[in-house]
Image (cartoon, rainbow, N blue to C red):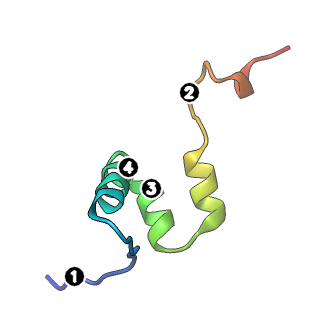
Amino acid sequence: MPVALVYFEEYNSKDRAYLREMQLKGWTRKKKEALGMNWKSELKKAAECQNKTHYKHRKI
């Protein structure tokens, strides 16, 4: 199965690159796809907290 590179970032140090890699590994597939496809609105939506106890979901 062929593989295509859809996204990359460049860093000046291995430490920064490693930290970014660990950050991305913790992301959901949906969020990674939005980053790779440059869907800024979808990335922002995927980054929002979906937890029901989040302050956005509280009724005042």
Q: Earlier in the sequence, mark 1 or mark 3?
A: 1
Q: Dot 1 lies on which element?
A: loop
Residue 16 circle label: none
Image point 38% across, 49% down: which residue?
A: 23
Report the residue marked by disc 4: 23
Residues under labels 2 and 3: Cα distance?
16 Å
Query: Measured along the vertical axis of the image, is residue 59 above or below residue 24?
Result: above
Q: Dot 2 lies on which element?
A: loop
Q: Earlier in the sequence, mark 4 or mark 3?
A: 4
**Closer to us: mark 4 or mark 2?**
4
Q: Do the residues labelled 2 and 1 touch (CB within 8 Å)?
A: no
Report the residue marked by disc 3: 30
Report the residue marked by disc 2: 51
Given the image, on which type of amino acid does mark 1 rest?
Answer: Val
Report the residue marked by disc 1: 3
Q: Earlier in the sequence, mark 4 or mark 1?
A: 1
Q: Which residue lies furthest to the right in this view?
A: 60
